[in-house]
Image (tube, coloured by chain):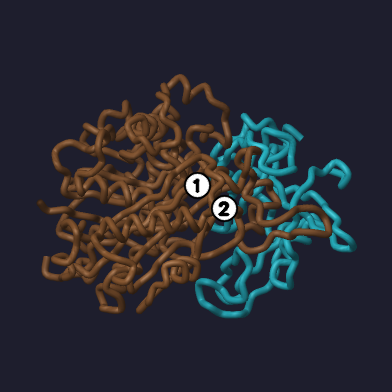
Chain colours: A brown, B cyan
């Protein structure tokens, strides 16, 4: 490969995570700071070394619990002196913020960027369980839908569960994908969660359990939906030439994918069997000499199980429409399989840490620090992918020993 | 359907840009902006044609016929609304590939909906103050013999 892409000047030097739970009822900024300080220490740095800050989606009050802290909260709490920062929602998925950080260090705007994502959706929803994704109240003379919600809320379709269900149904129709195949994403996640002490749901799940649980939006059942939770995750993106100053050999950013070539919409995207991940995945492989067959672990977004199926195809681990047969039986995606997938339990079983959990897990695995759930064979190449619908961002990571 | 039979729905915020779409049902018509230069239907409505970027757009009626591209039978009570389970679908109007609506399929059993099903628009009227909104829903397109 002739060209050296700038993201290769970025490494991930540390990772940290707060306590994670279904409902912790803790101050979300406190959770965020726990994760941030853990990541800084993991890299062998101090807050004084941090000169960049990145987050998704930035501070916002609704939906409840969606953002535990914004840029200004963390910058001020840690009294950071920043050369560069970004916090926002209109990005290539949740990891778009990390990709931005890679570019910031690559062009010397910052040296060590603290990247974080913090949620408290579990506590915010309280004991009533998962509420509708409702931006404010309803009722005549009151709330009116606008933006994308204008085209979905009047049809009682307020949730991504409904929108993703329609992608799954189209995939089932075109390619003969089955619920038994889709189930493998949830069953694999639960199996991996069983050896992750921080995972929320760790009890074994069988195919019969899956097929017997209540339907949410066909073909998606309850176990196809991730679990709202509380927790924060942070990583440090550093300029690669700082490696001698770091506590341990960093994870190398080999390539990133950010493309969105279809319409940026949940219902107008040209191909209803895939999503923006198609474009981000294809782009990533144009920026590296590595290929999908080099990848030894895949941590891929499962806000709903079907999204992981779409990512498997998008990243070229199987052909278009072939994710059903690819995951059939579950052996291939198991921790000791050909492509270990969502080795921490994903958002389905380990908790909805919203994208950053996948990157954290990929790094922990590449550092060989995953304990009982460690993928055997000292893996050196992994992917972290996040986002569903019109959101997608992907990183290819390496750890050469 | 009389208005009193209609389920609760969150209504769209009506603007000059979208009024034709949400009120066409008062005349029994499904309406879209259409570029008068190259014939492109534009949805969601914006002020320029996405193909030629021209501003010569006019509101036109379409047939109301469409095809189900995909659907889901929703069992989850997200919000007050239609009786559970109800069908949410993405339909494509017959006039132009890629012009799609998220909608509900009504007047048939949820299990009878399929990908490729031909459907036609029916309108559900809602009143909020002095504003009237017609929500375009879709029902199976019956053949003449079944009518």
Residue B8: x and y in percent read: 79, 46
| Position in image of residue A354 (x %, y %) | 45, 51
Mark 1, Cα crowd under 10 Å, few <14 / some 14-19 / many 20+, is: many
Q: Is residue B55 above or below residue B63?
A: below
> Who is closer to the viewer here, A262 or B119?
A262
Residue pushed farthest top?
A208
Identify the secondary structure beneath mark 2.
loop
Q: Return the x and y of residue B137 as percentages of the image width and height.
A: 71, 47
Q: Nearer the viewer, residue A381 or A332?
A: A381
Task: Of the two numbered discs 2 and 1 on the same chain, state the one appearing first in sequence.
Answer: 2
Q: Quadrant of the N terminus of chain A?
A: bottom left
Return the residue at label 2. A65
Is disc 2 in contact with disc 1, using a CB cutoff of under 8 Å? yes
**Residue at the location (12% across, 53% down)?**
A400
Q: Residue at x 63, y 34 (%)?
A: B75
Residue B131 in percent (x, y) is at 85, 62
Q: Quadrant for residue A290, please give it.
A: bottom left
Can residue A268 be spotted in the picture? no
Q: Is residue A344 above or below residue A48?
A: above
Name which residue lies at 24% across and 45% down. Answer: A365
**Chain ID, mark 2:** A
Q: Give the side of residue A34 with respect to residue A41, left or right.
A: right
Instruction: Locate residue B70: give its quadrant.
Output: top right
- Horizontal side of residue B98 vs A200, given as left or right: right
Q: Which residue is mark 1?
A: A230
Q: CA distance from mark 2 to mark 1?
A: 8 Å
The answer to whether residue A348 is visible is: yes
Give me the residue at 67% from left, 64% from top.
B32
At mark 1, the secondary structure is strand
Q: Out of A372 and A189, give the one closest to the viewer.
A: A372
């Amino acid at each position: 490969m002739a060209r050296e892409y700038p993201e290769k000047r970025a490494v991930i030097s540390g990772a940290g995570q707060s306590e994670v739970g279904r409902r912790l009822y803790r101050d979300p900024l406190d959770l965020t700071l726990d994760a941030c300080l853990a990541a800084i220490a993991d890299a062998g740095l101090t807050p004084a070394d941090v000169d960049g800050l990145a987050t998704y989606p930035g501070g916002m009050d609704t939906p409840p619990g969606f953002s535990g802290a914004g840029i200004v909260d963390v910058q001020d709490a840690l009294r950071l002196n920043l050369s560069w920062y970004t916090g926002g929602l209109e990005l290539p998925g949740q990891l778009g913020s990390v990709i931005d950080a890679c570019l910031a260090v690559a062009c010397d705007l910052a040296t060590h960027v603290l990247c974080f994502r913090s949620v408290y959706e579990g506590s915010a929803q309280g004991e009533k369980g998962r509420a509708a994704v409702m931006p404010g109240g309803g009722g005549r003379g009151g709330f009116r839908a606008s933006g994308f919600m204008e085209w979905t809320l009047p049809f009682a379709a307020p949730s991504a569960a409904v929108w993703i269900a329609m992608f799954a149904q189209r995939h089932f129709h075109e390619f003969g994908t089955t619920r038994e195949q889709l189930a493998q994403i949830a069953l694999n996640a639960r199996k991996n969660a069983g050896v992750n002490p921080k995972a929320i749901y760790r009890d074994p799940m069988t195919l019969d359990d899956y097929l017997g649980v209540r339907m949410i939006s066909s073909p998606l059942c309850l176990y196809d939906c991730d679990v709202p939770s509380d927790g924060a995750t942070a990583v440090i993106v550093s300029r690669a030439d700082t490696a001698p100053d770091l506590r341990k050999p960093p994870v190398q950013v080999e390539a990133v994918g950010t493309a969105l070539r279809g319409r940026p919409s949940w219902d107008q995207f040209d191909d209803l069997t895939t999503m923006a991940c198609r474009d981000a995945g294809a782009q990533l492989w144009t920026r590296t000499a590595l290929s999908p067959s080099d990848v030894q672990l895949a941590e891929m977004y499962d806000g709903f199980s079907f999204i992981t199926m779409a990512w498997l195809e998008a990243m070229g681990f199987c052909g278009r429409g072939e994710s059903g047969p690819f995951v059939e039986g579950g052996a291939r995606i198991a921790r000791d399989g050909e492509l270990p997938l969502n080795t921490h339990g994903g958002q389905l079983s380990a908790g909805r840490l919203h994208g950053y959990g996948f990157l954290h897990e990929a790094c922990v695995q590449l550092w060989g620090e995953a304990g009982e759930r460690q993928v055997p064979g000292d893996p050196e190449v992994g992917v972290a992918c996040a986002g569903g619908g019109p959101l997608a961002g992907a990183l290819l990571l390496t750890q050469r020993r | 359907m009389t208005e009193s039979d209609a389920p609760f729905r969150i209504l769209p915020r009506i603007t000059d840009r979208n009024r034709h779409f949400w009120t066409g049902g008062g005349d029994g018509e499904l309406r879209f902006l259409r570029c008068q230069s190259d014939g492109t239907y534009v949805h969601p409505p914006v002020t320029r044609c996405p193909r030629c970027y021209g501003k010569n757009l006019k509101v036109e009626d379409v047939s109301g016929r469409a095809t189900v591209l995909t659907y889901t039978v929703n069992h989850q009570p997200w919000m007050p609304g239609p009786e559970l389970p109800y069908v949410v679908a993405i339909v494509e109007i017959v006039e132009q590939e890629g012009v799609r609506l998220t909608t509900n399929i009504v007047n048939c059993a949820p299990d009878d909906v399929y990908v490729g099903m031909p459907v036609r628009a029916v309108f559900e009227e809602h009143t909020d103050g002095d504003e009237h909104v017609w929500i375009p829903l879709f029902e199976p397109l019956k053949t003449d013999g079944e009518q």
